[in-house]
Amino acid sequence: MAVPDNDLKQVQTYQESNLAYLQNLNCFVSTCNTKFKDFENLTGNLGDTVTYSKPPRMTSTNSLIANFQSADQRSETLTVDQQISVSYAFTSQQLIFNVEDYMPRFGMAAQEEMSAKIEANVANNCVTAPYRFYGDGVTPINSFNQLASALSLFRNYGSAKGMAKGYLQDTAIPAIVGSGLNQFAQNRNNELANSWELGEFSRCEWYTSNLLPIHTAGNAGINGATMTVYATTLNADGAVTAITFTVSGAPGVDANSVKAYDKFQFNDGVSGHPNLRYLTFTGHSPSAVPVQFAATANAASDGSSRVTVLINPPLQANATNAQNLSYPIAVGMTCSVLPSHRAGLITAGNAFYLAMPRLPLQVPYPTANKTDPDTGVSFRQTMGSSFGLNTNGMVHDCIWGSKLTEEYSMSVIFPV
């Protein structure tokens, strides 16, 4: 291991300034459900998993005659599949004469770098998990009225009791607060004006982030294409698991027509077809929520401008415990697909999980495992030297996994 060309200052000409670090808004890591704290305290490695249960789903009949249904245990698997490290090295002379008293600052810089990368990775669940969304990717989210509308749609579908959590783009907050200050509500407006933050609104705690993920849409979304249903693929229960669309205005063969995690919504007002609405997740009653879904894989269009999209969730009109539609998907219905966008989040029920097990000790090197109280990041620090060489190295690293339960979440879509 060679020592990098370090830029170090002589002690007699160098003064520590105590400048603060340029920190990010690490709201996701600090608010995730760390129910698996015991999992964090165990020694683990990449690929370790933990399974957590989800409430079973049932269906009912308007009769006293029993209609037995299968009892399914629903679960999700959280896998530790992410890794990161920061490393640096010194010669013995540099360590003794230049940076020995400065080492905590290097350690903090390494920790801040890792925490930002971990935060961005955890925030990516805003794109990959939800199949429901609020916003069209073109209209800015800039008012309390829009937040209230987003929450009403989130809860109309079915939501866990208690406070929800919302994660918004930091640059959108001034306009949202400004919209509230224009309303005559003296006490609340005094609080807003003094803090210039959202805080609690409509039984939701609002957090801001400068690390919300950007989803780059396929060309169908970028070009604002209308997607017309050409055919559907059904599973054994009769649920739609894939839809073949004819893409309006497409050039024919397009390898980038649809990207994984593109978001779709069925359009209203299509002649000869009903306006589709989701059923409530529990009770299977008609809701006010438009039928939305997400692509689960990239898809290319063919020479006839047709593309087959694998979808989540399966769209089921049959009377099962997974039924979510009153009417089946029919040929001729149309969908819109979101353009590239930045994704925030609304979730409830403490359904956003994070697990960070300890890494093994690096015998024979001195090793320590710590959990940072500010960022929630558990990390390992290892120090060592190359035998017979003038090299002293330090490594900071950690592993983690995160999971957002899809039916407990909804993306909030901001224009890029």
Image (cartoon, rainbow, N blue to C red):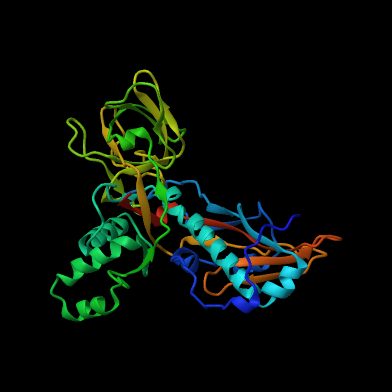
Q: Find the residue positioned furthest to the right.
A: 388
Q: How far across and down, in percent of the image, does residue 49 sit?
A: 63, 54
**Viewer-nearest residue: 295 or 394:** 394
Q: Is residue 36 visible?
A: no
Residue at image coords 38%, 27%: 307
Determine which quarter of the picture holds residue 393. bottom right
**In this picture, residue 273 sits left or right of residue 231:** left
Q: Find the residue positioned furthest to the left.
A: 184
Q: How far across and down, in percent of the image, does residue 228 sit?
A: 28, 29
Residue at image coords 20%, 77%: 189
**Viewer-nearest residue: 393 or 115:** 393
Q: How far across and down, in percent of the image, does residue 212 sit?
A: 41, 56
Determine which quarter of the picture holds residue 391. bottom right
Q: How far across and down, in percent of the image, does residue 170 sit?
A: 34, 63
Work out whether 272 lies above or below 132.
above
**Viewer-nearest residue: 271 or 210:** 210
Work out whether 239 lies above or below 64.
above
